[in-house]
Image: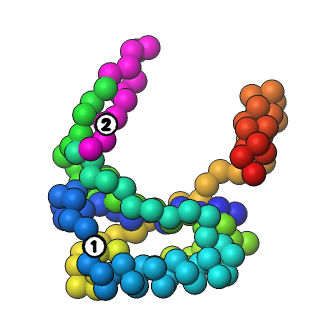
Amino acid sequence: MRFMIIVKATATSEAGVMPEESLMAVMGAYHEELAKAGVLLDATGLRPSSEGWRIQYSKGQRRVIDGPFAETKELIAGYTLIQVRTREEAMEWARRFPAPFGEQAEGEIEVRQLFEWDDFEPGPALDRFRELDAGRH
């Protein structure tokens, strides 16, 4: 089972303020634990939305919308992707996740399970995705 631990953005992260060395050390230690346990798949921070864009789809048309985006609470500042045996194991790792912006700062993480190929109906389109996935490993 794969889970994404999503770090929600704040006004500070959207301003591009980089984390202090002490926070980097705590995050590094946590991610080392994940790696030693064999559950870490990927982890990184994201640049502010001012450096990004969205593609909006409507009635067969696509429109590019440049950042920044107003609703900071709806943005992602980073993520950690883990693979564990159970939902409970994912919950335990998430409970240990360091406060993303420091112990004294406001912050929030969200945890979501990823779909696996077996969650989808079999068919030729799914087979193509499975082949792509197999080629990456």
Question: Does residue 86 appear anywhere in the picture?
Answer: no
| Residue 70 placement (x, y as % from top left) | 19, 46
Q: Is residue 34 left or right of residue 97?
A: right
**Nearest the camera: 99 or 87?**
99
Marked residue nearer the N-terminal end (2 or 1): 1
Looking at the rendered structure, the secondary structure element under dot 1 is loop
Q: Residue at x 40, y 24 (%)?
A: 57
Q: Quadrant of residue 121?
A: top right
Q: Which residues are magenta?
A: 51-63
Question: In the image, what residue type sits under mark 2?
Answer: Trp
For this view, does 45 lie left or right of residue 2? left
Q: Which residue is mark 2?
A: 53
Residue depicted at x 30% and y 41%: 52
Mark seen at residue 19: 1
Circles 2 and 1, Cβ within 8 Å, touching? The answer is no
Q: How is the image coloured?
A: rainbow
Label 2 and label 1: CA atoms lie apart by 23 Å
Quadrant into which the N terminus falls: bottom right
| Label of residue 42 in the image | none
Residue 73, position as x, y percentages in the image: 27, 57
Residue type at the position of mark 1: Pro
